[in-house]
Image (cartoon, rainbow, N blue to C red):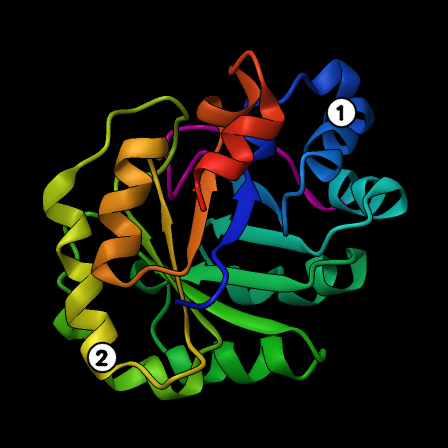
């Protein structure tokens, strides 16, 4: 199996010490930095926006994996791309024209990702896999950190895998720990997002390594 891309979610970091907590996961061998952007409309919570991503870019060595849990993502692709996103993931449920959003993201020379919520069938997105760099399967309802893993959502992974081009990144986010990571990677996922499991662990290095 190819290397698992571990992308710690800064949603679980200490925002008063964000630079320190970014460095902690970098030193632990993380691959990407997962940044959840929530608007209080598409999901019932508000997190961070463009200025914070821009600030993170100045101190982070890792690629910024930015997950837009927002309505009308097309309005924010350019600002987030210019702020330093290396991967921009929008939600299938938030757009009418997937192709145009993917084209817009790729026009900035960055990776285009698309996410599906727990209730969305994988069959709805199979036709888009060829144009994407990444598909993100949510194994919790998006909007809050610290929820429990929804095992039935992980069953979407092999469906996606069967239809996916060789180089597609299949990412999973929600309730990821050493046990659930194994379920996801056995199904064929090759990128894992984890927040609490990494940041609230006593040993960040071993937490990151255990996901591989």
Is residue 63 placed above or below 122 in the rendered structure?
above
Badge 2 marks a residue whose secondary structure is helix
| Residue found at x 51% / y 16% | 201
Q: Quadrant of residue 30?
A: top right
* Magenta region, main secondary structure: loop
Query: Would residue 42 be counted in the magenta stretch?
Result: yes
Residue picked out by circle 1: 18
Give the residue at mark 2: 126
Position of 155 with respect to 185 (left or right) is left
Task: Please provide percent x and percent y for residue 25.
Answer: 68, 33
Among numbered discs 2 and 1, the one appearing first in the sequence? 1
Name the residue located 55 percent from the left edge and 11 percent from the top edge: 202
Mark 1 falls on what kind of element? helix
Toward which corner of the image does residue 87 lie, by quadrant? bottom right
Above or below, comparing residue 55 to residue 75 in the picture: above
Is there any visible trace of residue 164 in the rendered image?
yes
Image position of 147 with respect to 202: above or below: below
Q: Is residue 52 magenta?
A: no
């Amino acid at each position: 199996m190819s290397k698992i891309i571990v992308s710690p979610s800064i949603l679980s970091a200490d925002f008063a010490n964000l630079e320190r907590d970014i460095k902690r996961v970098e030193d632990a061998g993380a691959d990407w930095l997962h940044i959840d952007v929530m608007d209080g409309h598409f999901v019932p919570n508000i997190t961070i926006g463009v200025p914070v991503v821009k600030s993170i870019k100045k101190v982070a060595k890792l690629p910024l994996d930015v997950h837009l849990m927002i309505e009308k993502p097309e309005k924010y692709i350019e600002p987030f791309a210019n702020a330093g996103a290396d991967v921009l993931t929008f939600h299938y449920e938030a757009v009418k024209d997937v192709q145009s959003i993917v084209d817009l993201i790729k026009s900035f020379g960055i990776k285009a990702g698309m996410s599906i919520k727990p209730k969305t069938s994988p069959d709805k997105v199979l036709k888009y896999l060829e144009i994407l760099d990444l598909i993100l399967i949510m194994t919790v309802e998006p909007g809050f950190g610290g929820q429990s893993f929804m095992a039935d959502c992980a069953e979407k992974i092999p469906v996606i895998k069967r239809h996916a081009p060789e180089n597609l990144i299949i990412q999973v986010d929600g309730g990821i720990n050493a046990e659930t990571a194994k379920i996801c990677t056995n199904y064929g996922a090759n990128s894992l997002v984890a927040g609490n499991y990494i940041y609230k662990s006593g040993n960040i290095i071993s937490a990151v390594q255990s996901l591989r």
